[in-house]
Image (tube, rainbow, N blue to C red):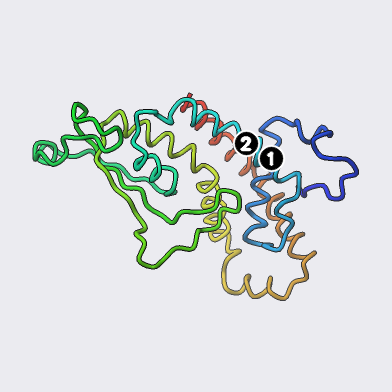
Amino acid sequence: IGAPANLDIPLEFTAQAHRPLKQQFPYVIEWLVHNRINPAFERKDPVYTNAWRKLDDEVRTLASSKFASSAWKSEFYRALKGRPKMDAYEMDRSERDSGLHDTCEACGRRSHPATFKIFFRGHPYYKDTLAEVESDSSDSDSDSGDNGGGESGRGSTAHGLIHWKHALKEWVEDHLEQDGWMDAKKLKERESMKARKRRDLANKITDGWREKNIIASLYRDFKNTLEEAR
């Protein structure tokens, strides 16, 4: 694909800035590929930042308006926003009847007994670069809580929306590994490449994914996630 370089006029005054989400999406995939294959790339190129912003605005508006429940306690919402992974399982009858889970830790109401146990895990990360936040070795890498079924469902959906960029980053990185691009031999080859050659390689990988309809399939998944959340 390749982000246009040296634009003569500010991006916001061009047709590029107003392209629909479907046409913005390939640029975020390209950014993620460059992030691993060619990390010295111009990550703040206006075309990339515009694409990320357009897509993220769509997701964040939905997440905040529909699923960021005002009834959630600040501790629960902070963990939901801060950890990129979420696991939930339904407690069995013995757990529910033990008297230890009478209060939903998401909303704090005793009239709303917990039926699910939720675990938030993974390292916090910067939302713009997607790089992990360096933390003290003594910091826990997970949080957990007991929640009612409704809160678990809403929390899961909100969590998926809030962390959509991190999930997409993981998918891209896993696929690059599956394709062999992160093998030791390939890494060594790239170390000796000039910047332009690494850039061309990252663009070639992205173009290959587009031709194989991989990017189109990822966009369908993205749109389906939004539609299901609505």
160 relative to 186 in the view: left or right: left
- Among all residues in the image, which is located at the extreme right? 8
The residue that disc 1 covers is: 51
Q: Is residue 225 above or below residue 121?
A: above
Residue 11 x %, y %: 81, 39
Q: Quadrant of residue 23?
A: top right
CB within 8 Å, label 2 to label 1: yes
> What residue sits 26% from the left and 36% below the top?
147
Mark 2 crowdedness (10 Å alpha carbons): few <14, some 14-19, many ≥20: some
Residue at 57% x, 34% y is: 220
Vertical comparison of 182 with 157: above or below: below
Query: In the figure, is residue 129 to the left or right of 148?
Result: right
Looking at the rendered structure, the kind of residue marked 2 is Leu
Indicate the secondary structure of the residue bearing disc 1.
Answer: helix
Q: Quick one: label 1, few (<14), some, or many (20+) residues within 10 Å? A: many
Residue 5 image offset from top left, x and y in percent: 84, 50
What secondary structure is marked by label 2?
A: helix
Structural distance between the alpha carbons of marks 2 and 1: 6 Å
Residue 209 location (% of width, % of height): 65, 48
Q: Residue visible at 57% across and 52% down?
A: 172
* 83 relative to 202 in the view: left or right: left
Residue type for callout 1: Ala
User: 35 or 143: nearer the eye?
Assistant: 143
Q: Which residue is mark 2?
A: 55
- Left or right, 14 with reference to 161: right
Q: Position of residue 173 (x, y in %)?
A: 55, 56
